[in-house]
Image: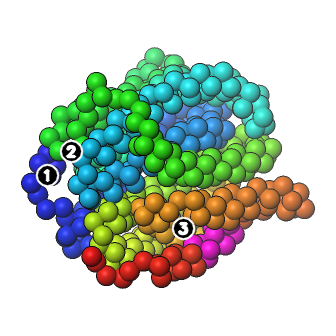
Amino acid sequence: MQEIESKENQIIHGVIWKQLLIFFFPIVLGTFFQQIYNTADAIVVGRFVGTEALAAVGGSTSQIINLIVGFFVGLSSGATVVISQYYGARQKEELQNALHTAFAFSIVGSIVITVLGIGLSPILLKLMNTTPDVIGPSTTYLRIYFIGILFVFIYNVGSSILRAVGDSKRPLYYLIVCCIINIVLDVLLVVHFHMGVAGAALATVIAQGVSAVMVTLALYRSTDIFKLDIKKIRFHSVALELLVKIGLPTGLQSVMYSFSNIIIQTSLNSFGTNTMAAWTAYGKIDAFFWMVISAFGISITTFVGQNYGARKFGRMRKSVRICIGMAMGTSIVISVLFLILGKYVYQMFTSDVAVIEIGTHMMTLMAPAYAVYVFIEVYSGALRGTGDVLVPMLMTCGGVCVLRILWVWFVVPFKPVIDTIIYSYPISWTLTALMFIFYYKRKCAQIPDTDE
């Protein structure tokens, strides 16, 4: 994609289903490898260190990371929307300002998060009722992770920019390389040098550092209008205002998601280390569904953004319908596979029979409801591509996050068992999906059904 300037942009001209798949597969494969190098930590420490170590690299630790990183990634999604629209309209100066502002934002943001993350890690773990045997290694993992948070931010903003202009292949290549590096370092540091949880965290940080360098070089060497100039990295007021205006609601939505999951995690922690380990392993397995569905969301955001910028409204609406069908079929297949193979997948993480039994039961409650979430992900991604982020954020926060929190606070006490906690997920997904269907149909009625 070095000479995009001279080529016809297939996102706004090519066959929709084919271009969606061409764009989708590198994203989902990239996320797959990202999950692998995250999951590698859990597998290696779970098999070679123990159940407490498995709980330490997941559980409360994962929820804290998702809370902080998710907020920034949500904010940076504003850059994806703005840059995709500018790219579709071929507005070079505005795109350049947005690109360099996004990089400046990631650098400043990483410094703040590093300081807060290192200082607050043990406090947050205690607030989440993390068991005493897990707090020590969890704190170690978090502090090492936050030292390298700059790499996470740089990679995410850089890969988002590449995807915004239609390049989903190079982020995939970089993640494959980094996945291999992480797995090799996991085995070397944890198994050979017996560094335990610290070794797993260090392996992740080094791998993320490599990915950040690679994506930065890709933008720096570009010959298209999205070329990065290190000397020009700074804040541009208009671009910053747009990025924050579009990205802040998504960032707040991510925070609410993470906060509701923290409430769930806190409730599950009260059931002991085996339940924490089971939920950790399930989170790693469950992540494979979320990587697929989020890839559809990213794909449709870019498609809608570029076509919206090019004033191709009919094509934009058609791409959403096609994406819904593809995502629905995929989610049903994943649900069936999880229900059939879940027990065997759990054995990758642990040989503890009690942990496997708890985890597979969790899966039978969650997996059947995956298809419902398709409407939330695809419609919110499509709306985000048009710049409509506030109402979708409010619907998601109210329907998914607030409802889930209220469920744990007021319903779970009447029957404090794992099943009652887990039911908060499919119930909140269903109600929120209904709201998105209604709002999207209403929004579409306001947009022309033809291209200009």
| Segment colored magenta | 426-436
Q: Residue at x 51, y 76 (%)?
A: 443
Kindly state the secondary structure of the residue where label 2 is placed. Answer: loop
Q: Which mark is residue 5?
A: 1
What is the C-alpha distance between the residues marked 3 and 2?
Answer: 33 Å
Q: Residue at x 14, y 45 (%)?
A: 2
Going from the N terminus, do you reach mark 3 or mark 2 first?
2
Q: Residue at x 63, y 69 (%)?
A: 432
Going from the N terminus, do you reach mark 2 or mark 1 first?
1
Q: Is residue 57 left or right of residue 416?
A: left
Q: Badge 3 is on which residue?
A: 376
- The image position of residue 35, as x and y in percent, is 44, 45
Asked whether 137 falls inside the magenta stretch, the response is no
Q: What kind of secondary structure does the magenta stretch mostly adopt?
A: helix
Asked whether 429 falls inside the magenta stretch, the response is yes
- What amino acid is at disc 1? Glu
Kindly state the secondary structure of the residue where label 1 is placed. Answer: helix
Q: Quadrant of residue 53?
A: top right
Q: Is residue 433 left or right of residue 189?
A: right
Q: Determine contact: label 2, label 1, CB under 8 Å.
A: yes
Q: Badge 2 is on which residue?
A: 225
- What amino acid is at disc 3? Ile
